Image: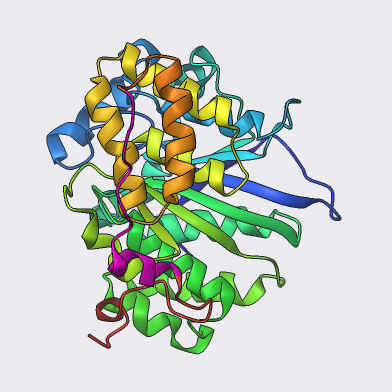
Protein backbone atom coordinates (compact mmCIF):
# COMPACT_ATOMS: atom_id res chain seq x y z
CA UNK A 1 0.00 0.00 0.00
CA UNK A 2 1.54 3.30 -1.09
CA UNK A 3 1.26 6.85 0.10
CA UNK A 4 -2.45 7.74 0.49
CA UNK A 5 -3.55 10.21 -2.19
CA UNK A 6 -6.88 11.28 -3.66
CA UNK A 7 -7.08 12.06 -7.38
CA UNK A 8 -9.70 13.65 -9.59
CA UNK A 9 -9.16 13.64 -13.36
CA UNK A 10 -11.56 15.74 -15.43
CA UNK A 11 -10.01 15.26 -18.87
CA UNK A 12 -8.93 12.12 -20.72
CA UNK A 13 -6.42 12.70 -23.48
CA UNK A 14 -6.62 10.42 -26.52
CA UNK A 15 -3.95 7.67 -26.66
CA UNK A 16 -2.38 9.26 -29.74
CA UNK A 17 -2.32 12.79 -28.28
CA UNK A 18 1.09 14.52 -28.27
CA UNK A 19 2.20 17.78 -26.69
CA UNK A 20 2.97 19.66 -23.53
CA UNK A 21 1.32 18.97 -20.19
CA UNK A 22 1.83 21.12 -17.09
CA UNK A 23 1.70 19.79 -13.54
CA UNK A 24 1.86 22.43 -10.80
CA UNK A 25 2.10 22.44 -7.05
CA UNK A 26 -0.51 24.49 -5.20
CA UNK A 27 0.86 25.16 -1.71
CA UNK A 28 3.32 28.10 -1.72
CA UNK A 29 3.39 27.97 -5.53
CA UNK A 30 -0.08 29.24 -6.38
CA UNK A 31 -1.60 29.74 -2.91
CA UNK A 32 0.08 31.17 0.19
CA UNK A 33 -0.68 28.04 2.21
CA UNK A 34 1.13 27.71 5.54
CA UNK A 35 2.54 24.18 5.55
CA UNK A 36 5.88 24.71 7.29
CA UNK A 37 4.49 24.42 10.83
CA UNK A 38 2.00 22.18 12.59
CA UNK A 39 0.02 25.26 13.65
CA UNK A 40 -0.32 26.36 10.05
CA UNK A 41 -1.25 22.86 8.92
CA UNK A 42 -3.94 22.66 11.60
CA UNK A 43 -5.70 25.69 10.08
CA UNK A 44 -5.76 24.30 6.53
CA UNK A 45 -8.89 22.09 6.77
CA UNK A 46 -11.01 24.98 8.05
CA UNK A 47 -10.18 27.57 5.38
CA UNK A 48 -12.74 28.73 2.83
CA UNK A 49 -12.17 29.75 -0.78
CA UNK A 50 -12.37 33.40 0.32
CA UNK A 51 -9.60 32.74 2.86
CA UNK A 52 -7.18 31.48 0.23
CA UNK A 53 -4.66 34.10 -0.89
CA UNK A 54 -3.05 33.62 -4.29
CA UNK A 55 0.61 34.48 -4.78
CA UNK A 56 1.00 37.58 -6.94
CA UNK A 57 1.08 36.85 -10.64
CA UNK A 58 0.74 33.07 -10.45
CA UNK A 59 -2.95 32.94 -11.44
CA UNK A 60 -2.15 35.08 -14.48
CA UNK A 61 0.77 32.77 -15.34
CA UNK A 62 -1.46 29.70 -15.22
CA UNK A 63 -4.01 31.41 -17.46
CA UNK A 64 -1.25 32.14 -19.98
CA UNK A 65 0.02 28.56 -19.83
CA UNK A 66 -3.52 27.36 -20.43
CA UNK A 67 -3.89 29.77 -23.37
CA UNK A 68 -0.63 28.68 -25.01
CA UNK A 69 1.77 30.56 -27.32
CA UNK A 70 -0.42 31.13 -30.36
CA UNK A 71 -3.23 33.55 -31.21
CA UNK A 72 -5.82 30.81 -30.63
CA UNK A 73 -6.37 29.28 -27.22
CA UNK A 74 -5.02 25.73 -27.12
CA UNK A 75 -6.27 24.66 -23.64
CA UNK A 76 -2.91 23.24 -22.61
CA UNK A 77 -3.51 20.32 -20.21
CA UNK A 78 -2.95 21.61 -16.67
CA UNK A 79 -3.04 19.55 -13.48
CA UNK A 80 -2.47 20.51 -9.85
CA UNK A 81 -1.04 18.71 -6.82
CA UNK A 82 -1.62 19.80 -3.20
CA UNK A 83 -0.51 18.47 0.19
CA UNK A 84 -3.73 19.89 1.63
CA UNK A 85 -6.39 17.35 2.70
CA UNK A 86 -8.66 15.96 0.00
CA UNK A 87 -11.66 17.45 1.86
CA UNK A 88 -10.43 20.86 0.66
CA UNK A 89 -10.75 19.95 -3.04
CA UNK A 90 -14.06 21.87 -3.46
CA UNK A 91 -12.61 24.91 -1.68
CA UNK A 92 -9.38 25.05 -3.68
CA UNK A 93 -11.02 24.23 -6.99
CA UNK A 94 -13.54 26.99 -6.29
CA UNK A 95 -10.65 29.41 -5.69
CA UNK A 96 -9.04 28.42 -8.99
CA UNK A 97 -12.32 29.00 -10.82
CA UNK A 98 -12.66 32.41 -9.15
CA UNK A 99 -9.17 33.22 -10.43
CA UNK A 100 -10.12 32.14 -13.95
CA UNK A 101 -7.78 29.14 -14.03
CA UNK A 102 -8.89 26.28 -16.23
CA UNK A 103 -7.58 22.93 -15.03
CA UNK A 104 -7.97 19.25 -15.84
CA UNK A 105 -7.41 17.45 -12.57
CA UNK A 106 -6.22 17.71 -8.97
CA UNK A 107 -4.41 15.38 -6.59
CA UNK A 108 -4.55 15.88 -2.83
CA UNK A 109 -2.93 14.21 0.13
CA UNK A 110 -5.37 11.82 1.79
CA UNK A 111 -5.13 12.97 5.40
CA UNK A 112 -7.79 10.46 6.46
CA UNK A 113 -5.60 7.65 5.17
CA UNK A 114 -2.61 9.14 6.97
CA UNK A 115 -4.43 9.29 10.30
CA UNK A 116 -5.98 5.84 9.81
CA UNK A 117 -2.53 4.26 9.55
CA UNK A 118 -1.28 6.39 12.47
CA UNK A 119 1.72 7.50 10.44
CA UNK A 120 1.59 11.19 11.25
CA UNK A 121 5.05 11.73 9.82
CA UNK A 122 3.38 11.52 6.43
CA UNK A 123 1.60 14.83 7.09
CA UNK A 124 4.86 16.68 6.50
CA UNK A 125 6.70 14.17 4.29
CA UNK A 126 6.64 15.49 0.74
CA UNK A 127 9.05 13.49 -1.44
CA UNK A 128 7.09 10.26 -1.16
CA UNK A 129 3.76 12.04 -1.53
CA UNK A 130 4.73 14.10 -4.59
CA UNK A 131 6.41 11.19 -6.38
CA UNK A 132 3.35 9.03 -5.76
CA UNK A 133 1.10 11.78 -7.11
CA UNK A 134 3.29 12.46 -10.16
CA UNK A 135 3.58 8.78 -11.09
CA UNK A 136 -0.18 8.29 -10.69
CA UNK A 137 -0.76 11.24 -13.02
CA UNK A 138 1.82 9.99 -15.52
CA UNK A 139 0.08 6.63 -15.71
CA UNK A 140 -3.02 8.39 -17.08
CA UNK A 141 -1.17 10.40 -19.74
CA UNK A 142 -0.56 9.24 -23.32
CA UNK A 143 2.97 8.29 -24.32
CA UNK A 144 3.32 11.44 -26.43
CA UNK A 145 2.82 13.82 -23.48
CA UNK A 146 5.88 15.73 -22.27
CA UNK A 147 5.60 17.26 -18.82
CA UNK A 148 6.56 20.67 -17.47
CA UNK A 149 6.56 20.90 -13.67
CA UNK A 150 6.03 24.01 -11.52
CA UNK A 151 6.74 24.25 -7.80
CA UNK A 152 8.52 26.23 -5.09
CA UNK A 153 11.67 25.99 -3.01
CA UNK A 154 10.10 25.97 0.47
CA UNK A 155 9.79 22.20 0.74
CA UNK A 156 11.25 19.52 -1.53
CA UNK A 157 9.96 20.35 -5.02
CA UNK A 158 13.41 20.82 -6.65
CA UNK A 159 14.61 17.44 -5.39
CA UNK A 160 11.31 15.65 -6.06
CA UNK A 161 11.00 17.00 -9.60
CA UNK A 162 14.64 16.09 -10.36
CA UNK A 163 14.20 12.55 -9.04
CA UNK A 164 10.97 12.14 -11.00
CA UNK A 165 12.54 13.35 -14.26
CA UNK A 166 15.62 11.18 -13.77
CA UNK A 167 13.73 7.97 -13.02
CA UNK A 168 11.36 8.50 -15.98
CA UNK A 169 14.30 9.08 -18.31
CA UNK A 170 16.26 6.11 -16.96
CA UNK A 171 19.07 8.27 -15.65
CA UNK A 172 18.27 6.70 -12.27
CA UNK A 173 17.79 2.95 -12.79
CA UNK A 174 14.66 1.47 -11.27
CA UNK A 175 16.93 -1.03 -9.55
CA UNK A 176 18.55 1.81 -7.57
CA UNK A 177 15.41 3.85 -6.90
CA UNK A 178 14.46 2.23 -3.57
CA UNK A 179 17.88 3.02 -2.06
CA UNK A 180 17.76 6.64 -3.21
CA UNK A 181 14.23 7.15 -1.89
CA UNK A 182 15.18 5.77 1.52
CA UNK A 183 18.26 7.99 1.51
CA UNK A 184 15.94 10.99 1.10
CA UNK A 185 13.57 10.13 3.93
CA UNK A 186 10.80 8.23 2.12
CA UNK A 187 9.24 5.58 4.34
CA UNK A 188 10.04 1.98 3.43
CA UNK A 189 6.54 0.97 2.34
CA UNK A 190 6.03 4.15 0.34
CA UNK A 191 9.41 3.71 -1.37
CA UNK A 192 8.53 0.14 -2.36
CA UNK A 193 5.17 1.28 -3.77
CA UNK A 194 6.85 4.05 -5.80
CA UNK A 195 9.28 1.53 -7.32
CA UNK A 196 6.34 -0.70 -8.25
CA UNK A 197 4.46 2.22 -9.81
CA UNK A 198 7.50 3.14 -11.89
CA UNK A 199 7.93 -0.44 -13.12
CA UNK A 200 4.33 -0.46 -14.33
CA UNK A 201 4.67 2.69 -16.42
CA UNK A 202 4.76 2.43 -20.18
CA UNK A 203 7.60 4.33 -21.91
CA UNK A 204 6.89 8.01 -22.58
CA UNK A 205 8.51 11.34 -23.34
CA UNK A 206 9.11 12.22 -19.68
CA UNK A 207 9.83 15.72 -18.32
CA UNK A 208 10.89 18.67 -20.44
CA UNK A 209 11.66 21.18 -17.66
CA UNK A 210 10.83 22.07 -14.05
CA UNK A 211 10.34 25.65 -12.82
CA UNK A 212 10.77 26.58 -9.17
CA UNK A 213 9.37 29.76 -7.64
CA UNK A 214 12.15 31.04 -5.37
CA UNK A 215 11.03 32.14 -1.91
CA UNK A 216 13.44 30.56 0.53
CA UNK A 217 16.62 31.18 -1.43
CA UNK A 218 17.86 34.60 -2.52
CA UNK A 219 20.85 33.37 -4.50
CA UNK A 220 19.85 31.45 -7.66
CA UNK A 221 23.27 29.75 -7.64
CA UNK A 222 21.73 27.10 -5.36
CA UNK A 223 20.17 25.76 -8.57
CA UNK A 224 23.45 25.40 -10.47
CA UNK A 225 23.65 21.68 -9.66
CA UNK A 226 20.06 21.13 -10.84
CA UNK A 227 20.50 22.73 -14.24
CA UNK A 228 19.55 22.73 -16.99
CA UNK A 229 16.51 20.65 -16.08
CA UNK A 230 15.34 22.47 -12.94
CA UNK A 231 15.27 26.27 -13.12
CA UNK A 232 14.98 28.63 -10.14
CA UNK A 233 12.81 31.65 -10.96
CA UNK A 234 12.24 34.89 -9.08
CA UNK A 235 8.49 34.78 -9.45
CA UNK A 236 6.03 34.22 -12.29
CA UNK A 237 7.49 36.87 -14.61
CA UNK A 238 10.75 34.95 -14.95
CA UNK A 239 8.83 31.70 -15.39
CA UNK A 240 6.74 33.28 -18.13
CA UNK A 241 9.80 34.69 -19.93
CA UNK A 242 11.58 31.31 -19.98
CA UNK A 243 8.36 29.59 -21.07
CA UNK A 244 8.17 32.13 -23.90
CA UNK A 245 11.65 31.10 -24.98
CA UNK A 246 10.56 27.45 -24.78
CA UNK A 247 7.55 28.13 -27.00
CA UNK A 248 4.93 27.54 -24.30
CA UNK A 249 3.73 31.12 -23.62
CA UNK A 250 3.35 34.10 -25.95
CA UNK A 251 5.27 37.36 -25.61
CA UNK A 252 1.95 39.11 -25.01
CA UNK A 253 1.37 36.62 -22.20
CA UNK A 254 4.67 37.59 -20.60
CA UNK A 255 3.61 41.24 -20.71
CA UNK A 256 0.29 40.37 -19.09
CA UNK A 257 2.08 38.50 -16.29
CA UNK A 258 4.36 41.50 -15.78
CA UNK A 259 1.34 43.81 -15.67
CA UNK A 260 -0.35 41.67 -13.03
CA UNK A 261 2.73 41.92 -10.81
CA UNK A 262 2.84 45.71 -11.17
CA UNK A 263 -0.82 45.87 -10.17
CA UNK A 264 0.02 43.86 -7.06
CA UNK A 265 2.72 46.34 -6.03
CA UNK A 266 5.97 45.14 -7.60
CA UNK A 267 8.16 48.14 -8.46
CA UNK A 268 9.11 48.63 -12.15
CA UNK A 269 12.77 48.73 -11.12
CA UNK A 270 12.45 45.27 -9.54
CA UNK A 271 10.81 43.94 -12.67
CA UNK A 272 13.66 45.38 -14.74
CA UNK A 273 16.21 43.74 -12.47
CA UNK A 274 14.49 40.36 -12.85
CA UNK A 275 14.68 40.77 -16.61
CA UNK A 276 18.42 41.51 -16.44
CA UNK A 277 18.89 38.52 -14.15
CA UNK A 278 17.46 36.25 -16.86
CA UNK A 279 20.21 37.43 -19.18
CA UNK A 280 22.86 37.05 -16.46
CA UNK A 281 21.87 33.41 -15.95
CA UNK A 282 21.75 32.74 -19.70
CA UNK A 283 18.04 32.00 -19.56
CA UNK A 284 17.54 34.66 -22.23
CA UNK A 285 20.17 35.86 -24.69
CA UNK A 286 21.15 39.55 -24.61
CA UNK A 287 19.18 39.99 -27.85
CA UNK A 288 16.08 38.32 -26.43
CA UNK A 289 16.41 40.38 -23.26
CA UNK A 290 16.64 43.65 -25.18
CA UNK A 291 13.69 42.76 -27.41
CA UNK A 292 11.49 41.92 -24.43
CA UNK A 293 12.75 44.96 -22.54
CA UNK A 294 11.80 47.25 -25.41
CA UNK A 295 8.25 45.86 -25.45
CA UNK A 296 7.95 46.27 -21.67
CA UNK A 297 9.37 49.81 -21.74
CA UNK A 298 6.96 50.74 -24.54
CA UNK A 299 4.11 49.73 -22.25
CA UNK A 300 5.73 51.68 -19.39
CA UNK A 301 6.20 48.54 -17.35
CA UNK A 302 9.92 49.16 -16.79
CA UNK A 303 12.36 52.01 -17.36
CA UNK A 304 14.15 51.92 -20.75
CA UNK A 305 16.68 49.09 -20.84
CA UNK A 306 19.94 50.30 -22.37
CA UNK A 307 22.27 47.41 -21.49
CA UNK A 308 21.07 43.91 -20.54
CA UNK A 309 24.56 42.85 -19.48
CA UNK A 310 26.32 39.62 -20.42
CA UNK A 311 25.60 36.03 -19.40
CA UNK A 312 27.67 34.62 -16.54
CA UNK A 313 30.05 31.95 -17.94
CA UNK A 314 29.14 29.49 -15.18
CA UNK A 315 25.50 29.69 -16.19
CA UNK A 316 26.35 29.40 -19.88
CA UNK A 317 28.14 26.17 -18.95
CA UNK A 318 24.96 24.88 -17.31
CA UNK A 319 23.07 25.20 -20.59
CA UNK A 320 25.78 23.25 -22.43
CA UNK A 321 25.31 20.18 -20.24
CA UNK A 322 24.18 17.08 -22.09
CA UNK A 323 20.82 15.35 -21.67
CA UNK A 324 22.44 12.30 -20.08
CA UNK A 325 23.44 14.28 -17.00
CA UNK A 326 21.50 13.62 -13.79
CA UNK A 327 19.15 16.43 -12.81
CA UNK A 328 19.40 15.27 -9.19
CA UNK A 329 22.48 16.72 -7.44
CA UNK A 330 25.02 14.02 -6.46
CA UNK A 331 24.52 14.45 -2.70
CA UNK A 332 20.93 13.23 -3.02
CA UNK A 333 21.92 9.99 -4.73
CA UNK A 334 24.73 9.22 -2.30
CA UNK A 335 27.59 10.39 -4.47
CA UNK A 336 28.43 13.73 -2.86
Residue 138 seen by the camera: yes
Is residue 313 magenta-colored? Answer: yes
Q: Residue at 31% x, 75% y: name it.
A: 329
Outermost front residue: 306
- Quarter of the image with the C terminus is bottom left
Residue 204 screen position, x and y as percent: 70, 67
Residue 163 screen position, x and y as percent: 42, 69
Residue 22: quarter of image: top right
**Is 75 left, or right, of 244 in this rendering?**
right
Q: Residue at 67% x, 49% y: name it.
A: 20
| 51 up-or-down from 19: above or below | above
Residue 138 screen position, x and y as percent: 62, 58
Nearer the observer, 331 or 227:
227
| 37 up-or-down from 224: above or below | above
Q: Residue at 34% x, 28% y: name it.
A: 31
Residue 213 seen by the camera: no
Give the residues drawn in magenta, as a range.
304-319
| 271 up-or-down from 266: above or below | below
**Is 13 left, or right, of 54 in this rendering?**
right
Residue 162: quarter of image: bottom left
Nearer the observer, 305 or 229:
305
Q: Residue at 30% x, 68% y: name it.
A: 313
Q: Is the image coloured rainbow, by chain, by secondary structure, or in one colour?
A: rainbow
Residue 284 screen position, x and y as percent: 44, 49
| 310 up-or-down from 195: above or below | above
Is residue 259 magenta-colored? Answer: no
Amino acid sequence: MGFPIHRANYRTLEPGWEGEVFVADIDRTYLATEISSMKGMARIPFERAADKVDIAGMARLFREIRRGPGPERRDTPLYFVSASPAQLRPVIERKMMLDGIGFDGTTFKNWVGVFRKLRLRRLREQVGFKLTALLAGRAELPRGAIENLIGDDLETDPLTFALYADVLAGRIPVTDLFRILRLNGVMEGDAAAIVTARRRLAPGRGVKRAYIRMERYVDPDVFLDYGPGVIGCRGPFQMAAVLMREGSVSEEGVLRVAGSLLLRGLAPEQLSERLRDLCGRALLSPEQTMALGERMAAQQQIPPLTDPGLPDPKWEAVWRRGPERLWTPPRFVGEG
